[in-house]
Image (tube, rainbow, N blue to C red):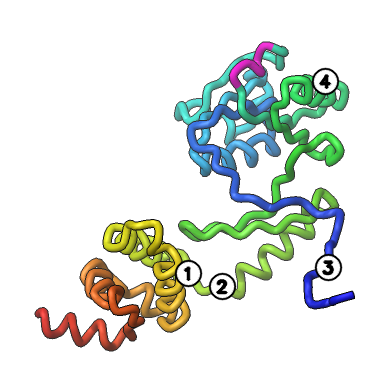
Amino acid sequence: MSTKFPEVQGGGSLILAWQIRDKHVLVVGGGEVAAGRILNVLNADAKVTVVCPAAGLNEEVAYRVSQKQVIHVDRTFEPQDLEGVDMVLCAIDDPAASTRVWQLCKEKKIPANIADVPPECDFYFGSMYRDGPLQVMVSTNGNGPKLASIVRKKIAETLPDNMGTAIENTGKLRRKLRHVAPNIEEGPKRMKWMSGICESWSLEELVKMDEQDMDNVLTYYASGKVPTYAEVQVKRDVQS
């Protein structure tokens, strides 16, 4: 049998960038774990409702409520809270109540995460590193959250401080390119050309690239040439 293809490694999770902008997320609980979950989904631009007695809100969650970053329902969870919900995050210290939330979510086919109970989770929260548009998640599939945090810190230490800015500039250039070459059939050429820019320009050069540089870079696209940063600066000097 051929061994040139990757071997299947069962037991993993499908790691995805889940787009939940404007989706309705229900958080059951208001303690420290809930606070972390709330921040994660707010960073993804979700609409968040927190169901928890006011006395159970920790300082951070109470702050989110006071700033109207989340909607607060001042009582314990009730089944009707699931109406119109796209995702449920449960973080309470009552195993029986947590399982009931899980069962109701399964009945309604709502994806849910029951904190610290891997068998009752449709998805896990990994340890996240964030630098602007760059997001790196480390997951242990529920086996060792602390170890995930340690691995994430080691990865973060190897990344340049300005990686986020370089990615933001690359994204701007990519969007400009789509205006220059909007046709679907241009797709393969666009991808190859953008790959050439990312591979041939240094991180520092991508960070320094401004709007004028981007416009000058795009003048090379039609020919398929990938210009060097130096060539783009020469063109800039001529324009000055």
Residue 118, magenta (yes or no): no
Q: 51 and 136: which one is in front?
A: 136
Distance (Cα) linking label 2 and label 1: 7 Å
Which residue is label 1 attached to?
163
Which residue is label 4 attached to?
100
Residue 58 in view, yes or no: yes
Which residue is label 3 attached to?
7
Residue at 70 percent across and 38 percent down: it is 33
Q: Is residue 22 above or below residue 240?
A: above
Distance (Cα) linking label 4 and label 3: 38 Å
Which residue is label 2 attached to?
159
120 sits left or right of 203 in the view? right
Q: Amino acid at mark 3?
A: Glu
What residue span does the magenta drawing correspond to? 80-84
Distance (Cα) linking label 3 and label 1: 32 Å
Question: Can you say which quadrant of the picture contains the N terminus?
Answer: bottom right
